[in-house]
Image: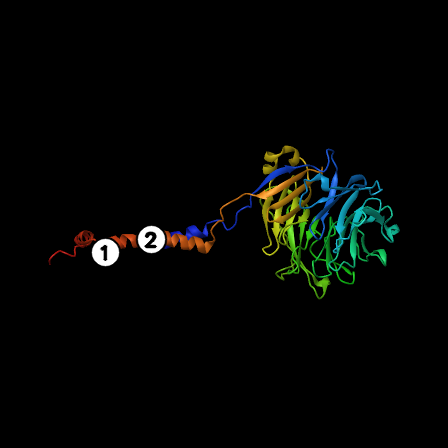
Amino acid sequence: MRKIVAIVLIGVLLLPMTSASEVKFADLTPLSSQDLALKAGDVSPDGTTVLVVGSEGFIHAFSANEPGDRAKDISIDSGRSADFNDIAWHPNGQTALIAGDLGAALRYVHADQTIESLNGAAIVNGIELTNVEWRAGGDLAFFGAKNGNIYSFNQGEGLSEIEGSMNSTITDIACHLEQNICVVTTLEDGIGVIDRTRELTWISGTSNQAWMAIDCPQPTLYTCTGFASERQYLLIRLDISDASKSTGDLDGDGKTEARLLEDGDSDFIKLSRGYDGTTLVHMAPMESVRYQPKLNEIFIHTSSEDLTEFNPTVAGNSIALLWENGENDGWMLTNSGKIVEITPYETTPSLGIMETIVFTAVAISVPGVIIGLIYMNSPYLQRKYRQLRGFDKKN
């Protein structure tokens, strides 16, 4: 019996702890019959509208819940010819900021679908702006530039450069959902933290990677996660009382060591916000993974093989935006303007460890109970058993 229990427990421990989430795809009506060369997109705070931006001043709005319905689209004339690289809704959902080439620092006004220049935009004249993001309070936004500069913005002060900027391209900006603390990633200078007073501090041990994107998706966790080339990712622990003490050295040994996504060969390039405080990281070629900050783990979301089998044309694009209304239930927008619906396969929920142990124990014990009852109620079997054991032999 002990041998049986040991075998059962070993078998249980060897069972896979997690399995890749499976999704299926469906084509929806694309935004245009032409290649739109989209660069970025953002979903409105109320979850109803998607704004996308792209080359040659392109900006477009469409329904976040019915993205295949072209009757609900809004074409927006920016009046500009510069490429737009990023867009960020204000937390109140009434406006959005746009960052682009040639110093394009603009505001979209939802009420009348207009585009206007920002106060103090002359300071970035001719500079290529790569990113923009609002901090949690909605009182201040930050722009990043290709030359490494970081600018803060509010309507009263306009745009102003932050001291302590480095020289390499700002690849992403993210802000904590409840604390007025933001983080920035660069190609060569590591990861920086901007505190409530706009003081910029660089996290030691992060300048040896080319960081592509960063996200702070959980309001209850004081963490952000950066994603670098060569499939590396690093959890940053924010110090809420003193942001300058934020660190990637989580175990206190003086080392900031990124983790490595070992499976596959795709590389991180950018990200979107996933369902339930997760991050959907875009990869090149056409793949995505889901990062779960509570576990500090990454799992497959969409694979290039599945997308190629579904539609080779889609697989030849890159991901501009992903958004969800449930886990593995949402949409993908490609850089060309194609829209793909993503839905989960219907699968039977897998058993957890305790359920597996209970099920195995029952499977072993029930036959034994049945055999025991038959034996107890059969004089013939009891007699045969005594004969086999020699209980009926006379001395």
Residue 18 horizontal/vertical position (percent): 52, 49
Q: Quadrant of the C terminus?
A: bottom left
Element under disc 1? helix
Is disc 1 in contact with disc 2, using a CB cutoff of under 8 Å? no
Q: Is residue 261 left or right of residue 361?
A: right
Under mark 2, the amino acid is Val
Using the image as rendered, state which of residue 202 and residue 350 is in the foreground.
350
- Residue 7 is at least partly visible in this image: yes
Residue 102 horizontal/vertical position (percent): 84, 44
Residue shown at 78% from the left, 54% from the top? 142
Q: Is residue 35 left or right of residue 310?
A: right
Give neighbour class at mark 2: few <14, some 14-19, many 20+ (Cα, 10 Å): few
Q: Quadrant of the N terminus?
A: bottom left
For label 2, the residue is: 366
Residue 11 horizontal/vertical position (percent): 42, 50
Residue lying furthest front in this view?
71
- Residue 145 is at least partly visible in this image: no
For label 1, the residue is: 376
Element under disc 2? helix
Using the image as rendered, state which of residue 259 and residue 54 is in the foreground.
54
Q: Is residue 158 left or right of residue 16?
A: right
Q: CA distance from mark 1 to mark 2?
A: 15 Å
Residue lying furthest left in this view?
395
Of marks 1 and 2, which one's residue comes earlier in the chain? 2
From the viewer's perspective, is residue 133 above or below residue 81? below
Under mark 1, the amino acid is Met
Residue shown at 35% from the left, 52% from the top? 364
Using the image as rendered, state which of residue 379 and residue 82 is in the foreground.
379
Q: Quadrant of residue 216?
A: bottom right
Count every numbered label the image shows and give the total. 2
Residue lying furthest bottom in this view?
241
Residue 111 horizontal/vertical position (percent): 80, 50
